[in-house]
Image: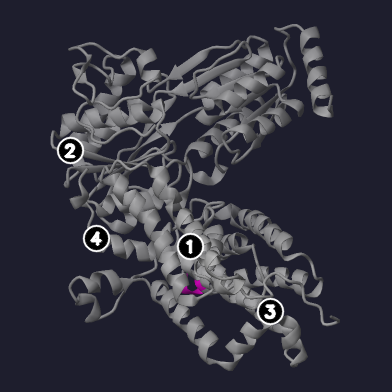
Amino acid sequence: MNRRSILAGAVLAVGLAGTAFAQQDKVKAGFIFVGPIGDGGWTYEHNKARLAVEEEFGDKVETVYQESVPEGADAERALTQMALGGADIIFTTSFGYMDPTINVAKKFPNVKFEHATGFKRADNAATYGARFYEGRAIQGLIAGNITKSNKIGYIGSFPIPEVIRGINSAFIHAKKANPDVEFSIIWAYTWFDPAKEADAATALIEQGADVILQHTDSTAPHAAAEKAGNVYAFGQASDMAEYAPMPRVSSIIDNWAPYYIERVGAVLDGTWESKDTWGGIGSGMVEIGEISDIVPEEVRTQALALRDQIASGEYHPFTGPINKQDGSAWLAEGETADDGTLLGMDFYVEGLTGDIPN
Amino acid sequence: MDLSSINPLILLASIMVASTPILLAAIGEMVCEKSGVLNLGVEGMMITGAVCGFVVAVETGSPAIGFVAAALGGAVLSLLFGILTQYLLSNQVATGLALTLFGLGLSALIGQGYVGIKAPVTADVNIPLLSDIPVIGRIVFQHDLMVYFSIALIAGVWAFLKFTRAGLVLRAVGESHDAAHALGYQVVLIRLLAIMFGGACAGLGGAYVSLIRVPQWTEGMTAGAGWIALAIVVFASWRPWRVLIGAYLFGGVTVLQLNLQAAGVAIPVEYLSMSPYLITILVLVIMSANRSRAALGAPAALGRVFHASH
């Protein structure tokens, strides 16, 4: 028995001795980040929320974080270390941390885990995510309207449901705005690699795309768009306002602060329980960044109207009739997609070309 | 699949841009290895060059001064490696690896306040007349200055090694440091200079990424380009023009893979990503099957420790 497992055993014993709903005076919250805080996108926003937690609770909370933790086995090491370091609640902020989170959660029943964008839960492991596809619908509407080449480039990260949902949602709404629109998709197989993202954006632009949508975390595609001239882009995960008004014409902003404050507060009160949270524009988890003046007034009005309709629940971005890529029917007229299908989405909708890599 | 959407001319032009960082780093490493020193710290020197170049370019507003600073930064870091391996006789492989880790950490520290800032724009040089030539003009004569500089550097290194006495001495040191020492050449000094040249080139390559290709600063942004540069040197069997071919091949595959994806070609990305490495292995196998180590072209004293008391 090595030292680590003795320690883990000790933590376990303490966990069993304590009561599940004890109130705590002080909470240590840990954060596992997939990229550097300075990425200007995904991790930047998670860290902003971390700071908001510190601000909210002051002395009652201590936060620790680790940047650029690789997804996969190494994440388990980082998580274990954080749990052994006395963290009461640990937020694992990327899809690839799903299995490591569940594995480590088993070893530390008294530590609460929160995994972003995943679907596996345990008694001490909750999941949370945001309905980015709602924001993608608005992006698609703007993109379809402002493209002149009718060609929209999309930089995907990994072919997982979250990313595929975004592509489908953007495509459906771009197509509604402009029936001639085409999507070119490049899978970068990374969340954060500025050089690769810049190359991908450049390749798309060279093939005639004049709007770039991205599901990767850096601002490099914006820099590439700016260099190319008349190319539009959208902020991803963060506002990326330093590229406004051109090439960045709008953005999807993830606002994790209210959720993190609620969950850390729940640990303090002793009311934390494992659940799944999937917030959207309505709950404020997804925000739409300012639409710049480059976008024509009527398009902006339409986009804002769409945002408000989605926020109020009046409109669902996946409302039938929608067919799958192979032409088979998916949603009938007026039918909306259920969350189960959306969470496991592994198909393109009709009109998109190319295959989803396995 | 719509291959017609790929414009071969634009593709070639962007291959030249994508290949320049690894080309610069590889030619520097080649000179270093020609002197008999194996410096595995290319990645660390590149990233240090990237951050030095970026910070200085942002502060001064001049990309040119940024590139000079990047070369200096890379050279200073490589000097550290030089002192450790040449004077303190530390193991070159271990020291090189440590240099990579050190460079990554140091660059993250220096670059902390510069994340998300935009770099000053480097203008493309449109060579008058030549850039107006149809087809070729577009590919070859409308780049930024560093692209031409990197090709000129290849030619310069080739000429230096082949035609000058100093180049001959450098090669002699790399083949047999004891013999060179017996002839009265200052092995350690020559190697230090070669190491610093390698560092400066790697720094320039890094700055090309942070100032032109991306252009912004983020931690770890060279993303393994230094390792590819090391592979290219072996692939090129230590010959300058083959370094050029190797770098364009590696860079080309990266760009081509993205373009094929954008055009919707159904080749799995993984095959394209691994192809340059497969080619390297293949070339190594063919060359080493042919004759003994001499055929590979590796300097005979590569990686061996030299001490004047021998």
For marks 1 and 4, the one nearer the N-term is: 4
Q: What residue sits 25% from the left and 31% below the top?
A: A171
Q: Tell me the magenta residue range.
A: B63-67
Look at the image and tell me whether residue A101 can be seen.
yes
For marks 4 and 3, the one nearer the N-term is: 4
Say if the magenta span includes residue A154: no
Q: Which residue is mark 4?
A: B8
Q: From what the image shows, is residue A120 above or below residue B247?
A: above
Q: Residues within 10 Å of mark 3 (few under 14, many from 20)?
A: many
Q: CA gap, disc 2 to disc 3?
A: 59 Å
Query: Do pointers 4 and 3 mark residues of a single chain?
Result: yes
Q: Which residue is mark 3?
A: B191
Q: CA gap, disc 2 to disc 1?
A: 45 Å
- Residue type pointed to by label 4: Pro
Q: What residue sits 20% from the left and 37% below the top?
A: A144
> Percent position (x, y) of residue A187?
38, 40
